Image (spheres, grey):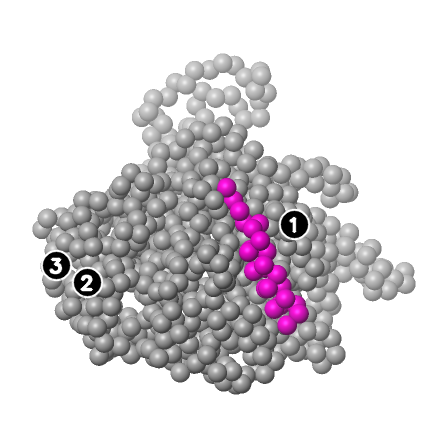
């Protein structure tokens, strides 16, 4: 331990002592000893981080909480309105629609988007040659700017018979399908693009985790007569369960905050079929050119954050035993 | 030795952090973009052209800035690309990133002014020699209920039916005889779709208030109104019989005639681009969009045609009007406001009121291959409008004969302003109704309108 850290402990009980048994001691240092002990240096080194986090992260969070109880257009002075913003959100007919759509998106993404990266990673890890190439190909969509990706997929989703997907399906005498132009097709179309755009990152995580799986386990399973599926089910999945649990909760939290796809593809349409909670927040804040309802927007943001916090706590509680066993 | 090195390291660290702070402080203190300096003059940023405009248009704008700065040596002008859209405007307004001078539609002017979101220009505006000559109905769009002038009108338009003459010809229709009733619009759209494979008639359907805006236009043309009364006491009447009729017509064109193509989510820019690209036979938009079609979409002038929106018989049918206001940021200093109004006068108003400026402006536009003579409505009075057009007659380069169906009839049509209370919210409530009719064959129009009316009424009552 360096000299200044040892000096910094002057007058304190030894580390590890029972705090309750710690004798009441008075701080005997002076500002000068604090400076000499390295306190100032520590603070100065911390200052940039504190300033950046304070200005860009903590201050906006505090402002969000404050604004949720105010009525403001950010030009005139704000007025306190108590819980009115929360009540307004709760009474908004679009609120249950947005919640339902968000759950639908998250559910579809879980069904479609969650197993695909795992399957891809398992297959790629088994490849004897070209694994790196497939890794690059899998990750490529992640590095494409989202707006470019959406523009690209808009041409794929062209509802005319000359749209890319409809042309391909036309060869099989299928379609044309309306894709984004139909309330029933729109959300699955968004999930499909979102899966393509985001799966690469998860594939890389799974590939890294798979390298940590002991190959002896597969050999032992093979000796016991296990086929590919049984190896995956009884060796790969249990070995990856910690990673799988984390990626699942990250995906659920991420999809609960889906914004980009509905905003860029459909603006929430057709007929509010792709209005999500985050899009509704955006709509409150910026949907009206007269200046937004920032109070309702921040109130709904807090409600979403609270719901996700509760969900995460419950999820971690329920999966704690499984992830540790 | 260790002690010396430690001390030196600490000193260096302290110096580095102090330098960082000093750099931060000095950069903020050197920011003199706000306010004015008597020696340096005043700097204002002004909305220039929309993103994606041609090089010629940009060069033309730069020339006008240079001319203004020459005439006003103490004013420095920074041009900023700008396009008004509801969501981006709201974001910029909240973030304080709008240029000093920007434009807003008539739709929002008064409410923004009432909310204190625009600068009070009363003093500067009333010093303009022609202030008393503004069309009273038009200047009212930039005046609050307390009589404060918070914006100056720069252009006025009526909604119009734009059509593609080439597609008309390909479909066996006479482009010099555009439709004059909605039944003819429907029949022509069907014929265009069948003969050319393009959308015979398209309508904005985006969830950004444009779908509701165009539905309101069609409902007005059939005699309907979206509101009765003003302010928070206004009664929403979105579920009126004419709106139902307009939606039923849309439904039939979409599902029975299949004449509306396969894209039903057009926004303002998208539909202009699609029309300029020859993908759309007819659509409704402001009468002054020819400039945008040239600047941003490079339309072939030969395909362009415009006529009035068909009006149903009866006293209440009218054409929805609108326009553009030039406004100033609410945090502008007095010097900035004065400079801003000078710019508004120079760039927007002088070409409408002064022969020399009108001709100079027209010459510049022609030299940079920009449209001169785009159909519009008078900002001052009809006499002044016609007089200004005679000044620039020899410079007019738009295909006027192709615009004659509009210009010949527009002054006979009753002009109806947009819904006065919670305008954007009323349009927004109608967006999903239009989308439902265009994307769901079994959409229940009555039920959809009932829900939209409730949403609009709630917004009106809350003043949103």
Mark 1 falls on what kind of element? helix
- Res A216 quadrant in image: bottom right
Q: Quickly name the residue at label 2.
A: B353
Q: CA distance from mark 3 to mark 2?
A: 20 Å
Q: Chain of mark 1?
A: B
Establish whether labels 2 and 1 are both on one chain. yes
The magenta segment: B235-257
Name the residue: 38% across, 69% down. B409
Can you give x and y, in whole percent of width and height, for residue A108 in the image? 70, 55
How far across and how far down the image is residue A183, in percent?
65, 59
In which image quadrant can residue A167 be found? bottom right
Q: Are marks 3 and 2 on the same chain?
A: yes
Of the numbered discs 3 and 2, the one sitting upstream in the chain is 3
Judge whether residue B247 is colored magenta: yes
Is residue A252 in sight in this rendering?
A: no
Give the residue at x 70% y 40%. A315
**Other residues around mark 3 within 10 Å, as few (<14) / some (14–19) / many (≥20):** some
Chain of the residue on which disc 2 is drawn: B
* Coordinates of residue A242 in the picture (x, y in percent): 70, 48
Residue corresponding to mark 1: B447
Q: Is residue B383 left or right of residue A200?
A: left
The answer to which image quadrant residue A162 occupies is bottom right
């Amino acid at each position: 331990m360096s000299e200044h850290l040892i000096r910094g402990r002057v007058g304190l009980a030894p580390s590890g002592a029972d705090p309750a048994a710690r004798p009441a001691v008075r701080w005997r240092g002076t500002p000068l000893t604090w400076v000499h002990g390295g306190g100032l240096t520590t603070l100065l080194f911390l200052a940039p981080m504190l300033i950046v986090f304070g200005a860009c992260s903590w201050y906006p969070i505090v402002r969000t909480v404050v604004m949720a109880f105010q009525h403001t257009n950010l030009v005139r002075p704000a007025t306190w309105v108590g819980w009115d913003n929360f009540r307004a959100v709760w009474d908004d007919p679009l609120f249950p629609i947005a919640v339902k759509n968000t759950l639908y998106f998250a559910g579809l993404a879980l069904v479609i988007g969650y197993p695909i990266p795992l399957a891809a990673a398992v297959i790629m890890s088994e490849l004897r040659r070209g694994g790196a190439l497939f890794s690059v190909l899998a990750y490529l969509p992640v590095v494409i700017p989202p707006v470019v990706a959406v523009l690209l997929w808009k041409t794929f989703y062209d509802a005319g018979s000359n749209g890319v997907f409809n042309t391909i399906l036309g060869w099989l005498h299928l379609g044309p399908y309306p894709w984004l132009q139909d309330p029933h097709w729109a959300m699955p179309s968004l999930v499909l693009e979102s899966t393509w755009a985001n799966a690469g990152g998860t594939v890389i995580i799974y590939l890294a985790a798979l390298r940590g799986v002991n190959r002896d386990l597969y050999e032992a399973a093979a000796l016991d007569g296990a086929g590919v599926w049984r190896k995956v089910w009884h060796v790969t999945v249990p070995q990856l369960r910690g990673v799988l649990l984390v990626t699942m909760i990250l995906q659920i939290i991420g999809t609960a905050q889906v914004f980009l796809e509905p905003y860029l593809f459909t603006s929430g349409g057709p007929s509010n079929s792709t209005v999500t909670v985050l899009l509704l927040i955006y709509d409150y804040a910026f949907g009206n050119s007269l200046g937004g309802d920032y109070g309702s927007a921040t109130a709904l943001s807090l409600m979403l954050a609270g719901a996700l916090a509760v969900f995460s706590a419950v999820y971690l509680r329920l999966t704690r035993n499984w992830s540790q066993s | 030795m260790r002690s010396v090195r430690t001390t030196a390291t600490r000193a260096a660290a302290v110096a580095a952090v102090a330098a960082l702070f000093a750099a931060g402080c000095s950069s903020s203190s050197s920011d003199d973009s706000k306010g004015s300096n008597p020696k340096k003059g005043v700097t204002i940023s002004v909305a220039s052209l929309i993103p994606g405009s041609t090089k010629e248009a940009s060069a033309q704008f730069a020339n006008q800035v240079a001319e203004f700065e020459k005439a006003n040596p103490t004013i420095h002008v920074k041009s900023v690309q700008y396009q008004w859209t509801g969501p981006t405007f709201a974001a910029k307004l909240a973030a304080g990133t709008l240029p000093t001078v920007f434009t807003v539609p008539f739709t929002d002017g008064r409410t923004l002014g009432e909310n204190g979101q625009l600068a009070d220009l009363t003093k500067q505006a009333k010093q303009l020699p022609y202030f008393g000559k503004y069309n009273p109905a038009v200047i009212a769009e930039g005046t609050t209920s307390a009589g404060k002038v918070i914006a100056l009108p720069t252009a006025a338009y009526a909604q119009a039916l734009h059509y593609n003459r080439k597609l008309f010809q390909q479909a066996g229709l006479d482009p010099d005889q555009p439709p004059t009733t909605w039944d003819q619009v429907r029949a022509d759209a069907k014929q265009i779709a069948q003969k050319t494979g393009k959308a015979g008639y398209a309508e904005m359907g985006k969830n950004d208030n444009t779908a509701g805006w165009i539905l309101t236009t069609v409902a007005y043309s059939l005699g309907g109104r979206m509101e009765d009364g003003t302010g928070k006491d206004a009664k929403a009447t979105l579920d009126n019989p004419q709106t139902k009729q307009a939606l039923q017509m849309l439904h039939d064109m979409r599902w029975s005639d299949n004449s509306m193509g396969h894209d039903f989510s057009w926004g303002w820019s998208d539909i202009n681009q699609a029309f300029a690209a020859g993908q759309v036979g007819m659509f409704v938009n402001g009468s002054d969009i020819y400039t945008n079609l040239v600047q941003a979409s490079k339309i072939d002038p030969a395909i362009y045609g415009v006529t009035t929106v068909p009006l149903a018989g009866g006293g209440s049918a009218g054409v929805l009007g609108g326009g553009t206001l030039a406004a100033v940021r609410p945090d502008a200093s007095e010097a900035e406001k004065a400079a801003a109004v000078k710019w508004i006068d120079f760039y927007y108003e002088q070409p409408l009121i002064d022969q020399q400026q009108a001709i100079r402006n027209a010459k510049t536009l022609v030299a940079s291959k920009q449209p001169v003579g785009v159909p519009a409505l008078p900002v001052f009075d009809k006499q002044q409008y016609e007089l200004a057009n005679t000044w620039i007659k020899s410079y007019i380069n738009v295909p006027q004969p192709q615009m004659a169906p509009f210009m010949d009839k527009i002054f006979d049509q009753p002009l109806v302003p947009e819904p006065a209370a919670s305008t954007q919210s009323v349009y927004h409530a109608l967006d999903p109704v239009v989308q439902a009719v265009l994307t769901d064959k079994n959409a229940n129009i009555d039920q959809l309108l009932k829900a939209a009316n409730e949403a609009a009424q709630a917004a009106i009552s809350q003043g949103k």
